């Protein structure tokens, strides 16, 4: 369902008109925080070639790392749906949590108690200053939709998630579902 109001926990789907922006072209962003001071989100559909083990060798897991956005790409962030296992987590909404105790998280990964359906790691995040995201909304850069997947979005979203979302929007967006990523190369 398309929304007009920004609320944390929603999904921001890049309009098909965002072309040539390597960070945001065909991105789906989970809005992790939004208030009068600004907004924070994580791109959930852009896997990188790295695993968590590549970045932190003492973690015996091959979970993929995702490009969370262009801000602070040298920092690791994570969202999850197991606040009962990871202390000090902050709820985003719909049973999705941000961060928490990283030592506990490492132990849970190494013991196999959490998997790709429970947690997602990101290098960097997407950030907007006060009213910047609203300005981008006014310029029709993003489509806001409810996160109907709730906390299952962690295991659901993939590299093809943008196309799936565009198909679900239907109408005039359907033509974009099969368009090449860069129409100028067509």
Image (cartoon, rainbow, N blue to C red):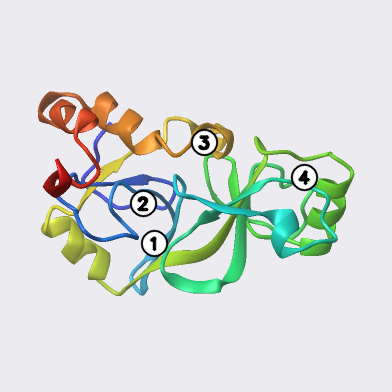
The residue indicated by pointer 2 is: 7
Is the residue under label 1 in contact with that under label 2 (CB below 8 Å)? yes
- Residue beneath label 4, please? 84
Q: Is residue 66 left or right of residue 55?
A: left
In-image side of 114 versus 138 (left or right): right
Res 58 label: none
- Residue 162 relative to residue 92: left or right: left
* Upstream in sequence: badge 4 or badge 1: 1
Sequence-wise, which precedes: disc 4 or disc 3? 4
Label 2, label 4: how far apart the Cα atoms are: 24 Å
Which-is-in-front pick, marks 3 and 1?
Answer: 3
Pick whichever of labels 2 and 4 is earlier in the sequence: 2
Sequence-wise first label, 2 or 1: 2
Upstream in the sequence, badge 2 or badge 3? 2
- Element assignment for label 3: helix
Looking at the image, do the residues carrying marks 2 and 3 touch, with CB atoms under 8 Å apart?
no
Where does label 3 land, which residue? Answer: 153
Marking on residue 34: 1
């Amino acid at each position: 369902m398309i929304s007009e109001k920004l609320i944390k926990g929603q999904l921001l789907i890049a309009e098909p008109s965002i072309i040539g922006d390597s960070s945001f072209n065909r991105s789906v962003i989970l809005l992790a925080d939004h208030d009068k001071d600004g907004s924070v989100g994580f791109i959930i559909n852009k896997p990188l070639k790295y695993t968590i083990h590549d970045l932190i060798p003492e973690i015996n897991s091959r979970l993929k790392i995702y490009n969370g956005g262009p801000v602070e790409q040298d920092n690791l962030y994570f969202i999850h749906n197991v606040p009962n296992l990871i202390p000090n987590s902050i709820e985003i909404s719909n049973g999705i949590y941000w961060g928490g105790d990283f030592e506990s998280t490492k132990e849970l990964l190494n013991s196999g108690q959490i998997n790709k359906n429970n947690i997602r790691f990101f290098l960097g995040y997407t950030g907007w200053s006060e009213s910047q995201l609203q300005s981008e909304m006014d310029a029709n850069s993003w489509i806001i939709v409810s996160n109907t997947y709730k906390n299952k979005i962690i295991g659901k979203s993939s590299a093809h998630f943008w196309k799936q979302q565009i198909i679900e929007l239907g109408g005039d967006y359907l033509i974009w579902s099969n368009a090449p990523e860069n129409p100028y190369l067509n």
